Amino acid sequence: RNVDKGYDKTLKLIVIGHTSVGKTSVISSFSDNSFKIDVLHTVGVDYQSKVVKWKNESIKLQIWDTAGQERFRTLTQGFYRGAAGILVIFDITETRSFDQIPFWVESIHENCPQPPVVFIIGNKIDLTHIRAVAFDTAEKTAQQYGLKYMECSAKMKTNINEIFRLLVETIMDKK
Ligand code: GDP
Ligand code: MG
């Protein structure tokens, strides 16, 4: 264990999906130390960075957010490069954002020679009264790609920690 650096490994995680689905909100609600138990520290740079505990190791997560380029569907190869984990997010109240899932999954296939761990995420479950995409529908789509489906609310911080924890665990178990 490298005591100077304060962590043993770095994992790059990226968050993609249609505009306004809550990508930035998901990242910032996870980066809020006040509701995290296993966070050691957070450092703000061009990506969100935080150190979490996994078994006996300290793992630095580099969580990359888009700077709005997803609006033009022009994320660079560099954005995907080296990503160990990817959250593909849509908004459960916006069918249009769900319809974009195939595009984003395809972009992963095109940009990531080594397949990362990918989860499909339905965000904004606090808005169930205006839900437009059923859980089962989304789960079936994810399963067609061989991917896990989970839901969350960045606003209420529901399931955010669980998603990142499972993502990190799945990546680490694969290594
Ligand atoms: P991005 O374009 O994907 O990064 O989306 P943002 O994080 O900027 O969020 C877009 C809008 O959706 C903002 O007005 C957020 O406040 C809102 N939003 C994000 N997450 C949630 C959520 O879980 N629930 C609700 N009700 N609104 C959310
Ligand atoms: Mg954003």
Image (tube, grey):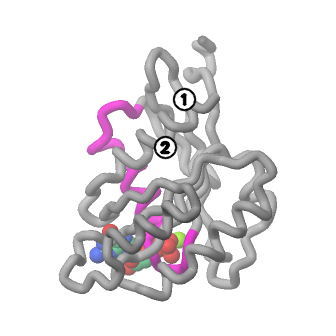
113 above or below 58?
A: below
What is the number of the mark on residue 87?
Answer: none
Q: Is residue 57 left or right of residue 112?
A: left
Q: Is residue 91 left or right of residue 5?
A: left
- Residue plotted at (79% across, 64% down): 110
Q: What is the quadrant of the N terminus in the image?
A: top right
| Range covered by the magenta-colored residues | 17-39
Residue 78, position in %: x, y?
A: 79, 57
- Residue plotted at (30% across, 64% down): 153
164 above or below 19?
A: above
Q: Tell me the residue that label 2 is attached to.
A: 167
Tell me if residue 114 is in the magenta stretch: no
What's under tag 2, amino acid-wise?
Leu
Disc on the earlier residue, 2 or 1 = 2
Residue 94, position in %: x, y?
A: 40, 85
In front: 57, or 166?
Answer: 166
Q: Secondary structure at mark 2?
A: helix
- Residue plotted at (32% across, 85% down): 132
Q: Tell me the residue that label 1 is attached to.
A: 173
Q: Is residue 136 left or right of residue 68?
A: left
Q: Secondary structure at mark 1?
A: helix
Label 2 vs label 1: CA separation?
10 Å
70 above or below 52?
A: below
What's under tag 1, amino acid-wise?
Asp
Tell me if residue 20 is in the magenta stretch: yes
- To which quarter of the image does residue 74 belong? bottom right
